[in-house]
Image (spheres, helix red, strand yellow):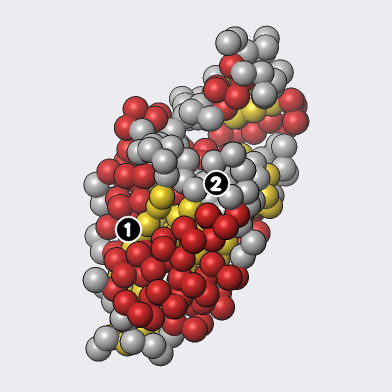
Amino acid sequence: MKPAAFDYHRPTDVVAALALLDAHGADGKVLAGGQSLVAAMNFRLARPGVLIDVNRIAELDYLRVEGGHLRVGALTRHAAFHRPVVDGPLGTLLSRVVEHVAHYPIRQRGTFAGSLAHADPASEWCLTATVLDAEISVRSLRGARSIPASAFFKGTFTTALEPDELITEIRLPLLDAGWRGGFSEFSRRAGDFALAMALAVLRVESGVIRAARLGIGGVADRAIRLHAVEAALVGREATESIFRAAGAEASRAVEPSADIHASSEYRRDLIAAMVARALAEAAA
């Protein structure tokens, strides 16, 4: 397995990277962690004529809290989240989710931003960004713009990114102490792509759900925010029966995909179970 021939560039600042993207358009591909791109190139499923390696761009490698958000630079590796990167529920939730991202060696190289750009429907970070209303900052020589996660993912391996644009930062809103998060995923083996997963964030006061954010992934062409189920949860008691009912409602809200790994009916059952488990963990 060898990739097709390509030209290789290693810019050391964002402007130089943007100039290369502008010059080569759709024929240029950005290399960060390379955990998906390199494999696709080896199988010749991807044949970029130009590879733009951004690993030497130090200005993209950061994690910081500012303006009520956790700001994640485009070169932040998955492994950065093995321990909470910020105090409070958000840091705890991210460190819980990252345990399910591929395998340990992959987490040392793969990047949060690269996962969003790849837009795999079974990506834990794509689901996280969708449920938490992340903002994705992108730049080109034409200027900068911020894209909400709800508009960023267009389908399997398809995003709102233009060929000359580079993700520079992801902003995740901080969660105050009143919130709690839960995540549940099912895969055949540890590290495999999820057949279904759910992420829930709840605010519970005196045993009653006051606010809810809920989404599922791995069952359609992109992560899905379950707004109707969220609304149905608000004002209800945080009990196991309510969570099971929410899982059942979630399973009816979508038409799950089918493939060689799982039928639509099987994924529908998984949705119900994953949603109930994620909600229970968030309420614990």
In this orientation, which residue lies closer to the viewer: 272 or 18? 272
Is residue 277 depicted above or below 107 in this figure?
below
Residue 85: x and y in percent read 28, 50
In this orientation, which residue lies closer to the viewer: 150 or 260? 260
Q: Residue at x 69, y 20 (%)?
A: 47
Element under label 1? helix
In this orientation, which residue lies closer to the viewer: 118 or 277? 277
Q: Residue at x 71, y 37 (%)?
A: 164
For marks 1 and 2, give the CA distance.
27 Å
Residue 269: x and y in percent read 49, 61
Residue type at tag 1: Leu
Q: Residue at x 53, y 30 (%)?
A: 36
Element under label 2? loop
For residue 48, side relative to residue 77 (left or right): right
Marks 1 and 2, the one that precedes in the sequence: 1
Residue 88: x and y in percent read 26, 64
Please identify, in this view, whether the residue under mark 1 or under mark 2 is nearer the observer: 2
Q: Which residue is mark 2?
A: 262
For residue 124, side relative to residue 17 (left or right): left
In this orientation, which residue lies closer to the viewer: 111 or 43? 43
The quarter of the image holding the C terminus is bottom left
Q: Which mark is residue 93?
A: 1
Q: Residues within 10 Å of mark 1 (few under 14, many from 20)?
A: many
* Snapshot quadrant of residue 174: bottom left
* Snapshot quadrant of residue 203: bottom left
